[in-house]
Image: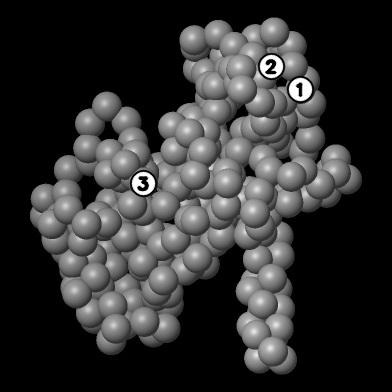
């Protein structure tokens, strides 16, 4: 019984990292259509806090909170928060308020149009259908990318995940997707032309800004099987990486 309680305590401690709480509410949110397809409905309440706009959306079935980099919206507007990432038990310091769940997104449409001020789409699990698409109208050119000195290709990192786990890796590639300041970090998807579908993409978090199409050199430690709660998991991810735009 003591061992069981200790295990439960550890799980709860991990789940209570800022904005990444796992709870019955979070589990339900991860399975809901809003988590996979976007949060859509009429705005019944809105507020701005720090750099985000929070909207209470009436989906027709229930009312749910969504948030995205600041955008203009008013009560009665029809909104879509695409590819929304649910954060259970989320505490906003600027609002001094804890929400049961907030769906974070940067892929926003208001009354059918995309506000110019909305940011990039919220970071989603690597196995989410939307992450297979490069951002923008055309995929960046991945030809002629030279291997990082003493580094690895994206495919080699996938193939050698057991060998590289917890160790420094270096990879040169192009940014195919960029998500700005989600949970205080920038999220990149990097490809170098190696690998097949499922082994050709590497997720990176960093404080460095980049844009789709940039050639970048990424260095950092490889983490495996990272679980951010709410059913969102990454098989491979380089966290807090040093990213140099070349």
Going by the image, does 6 lie left or right of 28? right
- Disc 1/disc 3 C-alpha distance (Å): 28 Å
- Label 2 sits on a secondary structure element that is strand
- Quarter of the image where one finds residue 201: bottom left
- Label 3 sits on a secondary structure element that is loop
User: Does label 1 or label 3 sit earlier along the sequence?
Assistant: 1
- Label 1 sits on a secondary structure element that is strand
* Figure check: 87 above or below 237: above
* Figure check: 171 above or below 129: below
Q: Residue at x 61, y 17 (%)?
A: 60
Tell me if I can see residue 243 in this picture: no
Q: Which residue is mark 1?
A: 46
* Quarter in which the C terminus is drawn: bottom left
- Disc 3/disc 2 C-alpha distance (Å): 26 Å
How far across and down, in percent of the image, does residue 165 sit? 36, 82
How far across and down, in percent of the image, does residue 176 sit? 31, 45
* Figure check: 132 above or below 224: above
Image marks 2 and 1: residues in contact by CB distance under 8 Å: yes
Q: Residue furthest front?
A: 1
Within 10 Å of disc 3 (Cα), the crowding (few <14, some 14-19, many 20+) is few
Image marks 3 and 2: residues in contact by CB distance under 8 Å: no
Within 10 Å of disc 2 (Cα), the crowding (few <14, some 14-19, many 20+) is many
- Disc 2/disc 1 C-alpha distance (Å): 7 Å
Q: Which residue is mark 2?
A: 43
User: Nearest the camera: 50 or 66?
Assistant: 66
Where residue 128 is drawn, which disc sits there?
A: 3
């Amino acid at each position: 019984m003591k061992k069981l309680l200790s295990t439960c305590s550890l799980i709860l401690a991990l789940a209570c990292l800022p904005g990444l709480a796992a709870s019955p509410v979070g589990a339900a949110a991860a399975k809901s259509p809003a988590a996979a397809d976007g949060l859509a409905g009429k705005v019944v309440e809105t507020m701005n806090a720090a750099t985000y706009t929070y909207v209470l959306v009436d989906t027709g079935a229930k009312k749910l909170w969504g948030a995205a980099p600041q955008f203009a919206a008013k009560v009665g507007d029809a909104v879509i928060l695409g590819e929304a990432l649910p954060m259970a038990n989320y505490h906003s310091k600027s609002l001094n308020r804890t929400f049961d769940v907030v769906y974070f997104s940067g892929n926003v449409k208001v009354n059918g149009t995309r506000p110019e001020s909305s940011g990039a789409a919220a970071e989603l699990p690597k196995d989410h259908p939307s992450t297979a698409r490069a951002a923008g109208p055309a995929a960046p050119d991945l030809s002629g990318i030279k291997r990082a000195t003493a580094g690895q290709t994206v495919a080699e990192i996938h193939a050698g995940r057991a060998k590289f786990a917890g160790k420094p890796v270096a990879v040169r590639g192009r940014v195919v997707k960029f998500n700005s300041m989600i949970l205080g970090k920038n999220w990149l998807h990097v490809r170098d032309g190696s690998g097949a579908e499922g082994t050709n993409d590497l997720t990176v978090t960093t404080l460095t800004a980049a844009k789709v199409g940039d050639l970048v050199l990424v260095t950092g430690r490889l983490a495996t099987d990272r679980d951010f709660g709410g059913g969102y998991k990454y098989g491979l991810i380089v966290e807090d990486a040093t990213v140099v735009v070349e």
